[in-house]
Image (cartoon, rainbow, N blue to C red):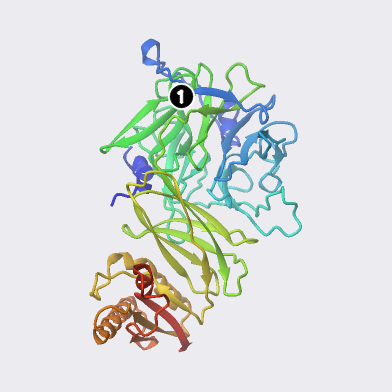
C-alpha cells in the first residue's frame, strides 16, 4: 500500500540583513540583488481565487506567516507591530464572534531578537519557529511544547522554554521558516547552507524513531533555482508543497508556487493571479484541516508593509484525512504527561511523535489515507500501549476517531500489537513495531522478567486452540531472544479461549480475544 506521507519527502529527494528576507527569517541574513524571470501575457494563469485582507490582524507594520491548528478559533503569526519584544515577534489571536480578536504577544516564545514564521502541530501542542538566541548560526529552528498551566489564565497558552532543534537540523548558516507535516514525519525549511542550488533553498529532513531528525536533504533543482526559494508549506495530505521563489518565472519579486509529483515526475506550478501580483507574495500556508489558505503580501491596498490575506477557494484539492483524538490516562484515571507516536506498520517507519497536554492528557493526530498505522502511548515508568488504525485508501471524506489509552504501571500487563495469519503462528512483519518496543523495554528494565501469553477465541477445537496460542507466544519469545533478550527472562503460556476479555458472540468480541499479552511477573 502506498504511503502518502512519503510523498513530501520523495519530493525533496527527487527534485536577514535587511528587507524581505530579514522579514521572512524573523532574523538577520544577507542576500544579493537578483533579476527574476518574468511571465507575460498568456503565460500568466488567471484564477477565480478571492484574496481578502485579514483587517483584524493586520497593522501598519509587517504581518506574515499565519499558522492554524485544527482548532480554527486560534491563529498564530509574526509581526513587527508596536508591542514586539524584538524586531519581529510571534503573536496569537482568538476568534471573537465572527472576527478575530486583538492579537496578543505569545510571551514565552519571544525574546529580544527576531522570531517568526511558525508552524503548529494539529492539536496545537507543539510549535516550530525561527529565532536567534545563542544558536548555531545566523538563524535557527526552535520547538516549544505546551506545559503545565498552573495559575496561568485560560486565554494564555503556557508554552515551555523553546528548545533549539540542534546541529542535526541547524547549522552555522541561515535556517528558517519551518513547516512540520501534519503527521509529524517531515520538517521542511529554507536555508542558505552549502550544497544547494542557489542562495536560499528548500530542505527537508525526516524524524527518526528517537524523536531526533535525519540530516537535511535538499529538495533538488526541480524546486530550487540559483536564486531564492523560501517559506515552504506542505499540504496536510502530504501531496503538494507550496513555496515562494524569485527564481522560477513569475510576475513579481517573490511569487507563490506549488510542486506535486505525478507518475514520478515533479512539476512546479505558478499559482497565477490574483494570488500572485507584481508585488511580493510569501508565507503561503494552509490550516491543518486544509480548508483555509493564507498568504502575506506587500501589494497595494493593505494597511502597510506585509499584510495577511485569506485565499478562497484553497488552490489545491486535499485528500480526505482521518483525525484521531483521545486522552492518555493512568490506571487511576488521571491525565498523564505522555508521548504518542505514529508508525507506518507496513513500511515500519516511525512518522510523528506528539506530546500530550500535561493538564488533560489529550492529543490530536491527523493521518493521511491509505496507510496501516500504529498509535503508541508511552510514559516514563509505565508500560507502552499500542493500537492499530487503518485509514483506507478509498476514504471518501474527512473522518474522526477517538482512541483513549490507559497506561499500566511497569508491573502490569499489555496486549502486544502482533499479527498472524489465520491458524498460523508465524509473526507477520507488521508485528515488529511493538516487538521492538518490548525489546527496548526489557533492555531498559534488566531486573524484570515477563510472561508471554497467547489467547484465542472460542471457535474450533479447544485443544488445538491451546496449542496455537502457545505457539504464537513462543514466536514472540523467539523474536525477543533473537534480539538479545536472555531466554531465562521469558516464559510462555498458551491459554486458548480460557481467559476472554470480551464476549465471543460477535466477530468484534472474538477479535479482541485473539491476542498475545506481555505480563511483568517478577524481578529477575
Which residue is pictured at 27% across the width and 82% down the height? 465
Judged left or right of residue 360, residue 237 is: left
Quadrant of the snapshot with the C terminus: bottom left
- The relative height of residue 295 versus residue 126 in the rendered view (above or below) is above
Judged left or right of residue 348, residue 114 is: right
Farthest residue in the top direction? 41
Could one spot residue 16 in this view of the protein? no
Judged left or right of residue 220, residue 54 is: right
Residue 30 rendering spot, x and y as whole percentages:
55, 30
The total of numbered circles placed on residues is 1
Which residue is pictured at 55% across the width and 75% down the height? 381
Residue 160 rendering spot, x and y as whole percentages:
65, 55
- The relative height of residue 159 versus residue 24 in the rendered view (above or below) is below
Q: Quadrant of residue 68?
A: top right
| Frontmost residue, 80 versus 380 | 380
Secondary structure under tag 1 reads loop
| Frontmost residue, 384 versus 281 | 384
Which residue is pictured at 55% across the width and 71% down the height? 380
- Mark 1, residues whose alpha carbon is within 10 Å: few (<14), some, or many (≥20)? many
Could one spot residue 440 in this view of the protein? yes
- The relative height of residue 516 versus residue 47 in the rendered view (above or below) is below
Farthest residue in the front direction? 505
Residue 106 rendering spot, x and y as whole percentages:
68, 44
Disc 1 designates what residue?
246
| Frontmost residue, 410 versus 220 | 410
Q: Quadrant of residue 119?
A: top right
- The relative height of residue 9 versus residue 34 in the rendered view (above or below) is below
Residue 72 rendering spot, x and y as whole percentages:
58, 41
Amino acid at each position: 500500500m502506498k504511503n502518502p506521507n512519503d510523498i513530501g519527502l520523495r519530493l525533496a529527494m527527487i527534485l536577514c540583513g535587511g528587507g524581505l528576507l530579514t522579514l521572512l527569517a524573523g532574523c538577520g541574513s544577507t542576500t544579493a540583488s537578483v533579476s527574476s524571470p518574468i511571465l507575460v501575457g498568456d503565460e500568466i494563469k488567471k484564477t477565480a481565487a478571492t484574496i481578502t485582507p485579514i483587517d483584524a490582524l493586520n497593522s501598519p507594520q509587517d504581518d506574515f506567516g499565519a499558522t492554524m491548528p485544527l482548532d480554527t478559533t486560534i491563529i498564530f503569526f509574526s509581526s513587527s507591530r508596536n508591542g514586539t519584544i524584538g524586531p519581529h515577534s510571534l503573536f496569537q489571536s482568538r476568534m471573537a464572534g465572527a472576527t478575530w480578536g486583538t492579537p496578543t504577544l505569545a510571551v514565552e516564545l519571544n525574546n529580544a531578537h527576531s522570531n517568526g514564521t511558525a508552524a503548529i502541530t494539529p492539536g496545537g501542542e507543539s510549535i516550530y519557529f525561527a529565532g536567534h538566541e545563542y544558536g548555531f548560526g545566523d538563524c535557527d529552528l526552535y520547538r516549544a511544547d505546551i506545559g503545565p498551566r498552573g495559575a496561568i489564565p485560560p486565554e494564555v497558552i503556557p508554552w515551555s522554554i523553546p528548545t533549539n532543534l540542534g546541529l542535526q537540523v541547524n547549522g552555522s548558516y541561515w535556517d528558517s521558516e519551518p513547516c512540520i507535516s501534519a503527521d509529524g514525519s517531515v520538517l521542511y525549511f529554507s536555508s542558505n547552507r552549502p550544497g544547494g542550488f542557489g542562495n536560499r533553498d528548500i530542505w527537508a529532513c525526516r524524524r527518526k524513531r528517537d524523536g531526533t531528525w535525519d540530516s537535511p536533504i535538499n529538495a533538488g533543482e526541480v524546486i530550487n533555482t540559483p536564486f531564492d526559494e523560501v517559506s515552504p508549506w506542505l499540504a496536510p495530505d502530504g501531496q503538494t508543497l507550496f513555496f515562494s521563489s524569485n527564481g522560477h518565472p513569475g510576475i513579481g519579486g517573490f511569487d507563490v508556487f506549488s510542486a506535486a509529483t505525478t507518475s514520478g515526475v515533479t512539476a512546479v506550478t505558478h499559482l497565477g493571479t490574483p494570488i500572485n501580483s507584481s508585488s511580493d507574495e510569501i508565507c503561503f500556508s494552509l490550516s491543518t484541516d486544509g480548508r483555509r489558505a493564507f498568504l502575506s503580501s506587500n501589494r497595494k491596498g493593505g494597511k502597510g508593509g506585509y499584510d495577511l490575506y485569506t485565499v478562497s477557494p484553497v488552490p489545491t484539492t486535499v485528500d480526505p484525512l482521518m483525525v484521531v483524538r483521545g486522552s492518555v490516562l493512568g490506571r487511576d484515571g488521571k491525565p498523564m504527561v505522555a508521548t504518542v507516536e505514529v508508525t507506518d506498520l507496513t513500511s515500519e517507519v516511525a512518522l510523528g511523535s506528539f506530546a500530550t497536554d500535561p493538564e488533560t492528557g489529550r492529543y490530536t493526530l491527523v493521518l493521511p489515507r491509505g496507510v496501516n498505522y500504529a498509535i503508541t502511548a508511552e510514559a516514563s515508568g509505565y508500560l507502552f500501549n499500542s493500537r492499530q488504525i487503518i485509514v483506507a485508501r478509498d476514504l471518501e471524506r474527512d473522518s474522526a476517531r477517538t482512541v483513549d489509552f490507559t497506561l499500566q504501571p511497569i508491573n502490569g500487563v499489555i496486549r502486544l500489537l502482533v499479527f498472524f495469519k489465520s491458524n498460523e503462528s508465524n509473526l507477520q512483519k507488521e508485528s515488529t513495531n511493538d516487538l521492538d518496543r518490548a525489546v527496548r523495554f526489557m533492555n531498559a528494565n534488566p531486573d524484570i522478567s515477563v510472561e508471554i501469553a497467547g489467547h484465542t477465541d472460542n471457535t474450533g477445537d479447544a485443544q488445538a486452540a491451546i496449542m496455537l496460542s502457545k505457539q504464537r507466544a513462543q514466536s514472540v519469545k523467539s523474536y525477543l531472544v533473537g534480539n538479545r533478550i536472555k531466554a531465562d527472562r521469558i516464559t510462555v503460556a498458551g491459554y486458548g479461549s480460557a481467559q476472554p476479555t470480551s464476549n465471543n458472540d460477535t466477530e468484534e468480541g472474538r477479535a479482541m480475544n485473539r491476542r498475545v499479552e506481555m505480563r511483568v511477573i517478577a524481578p529477575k
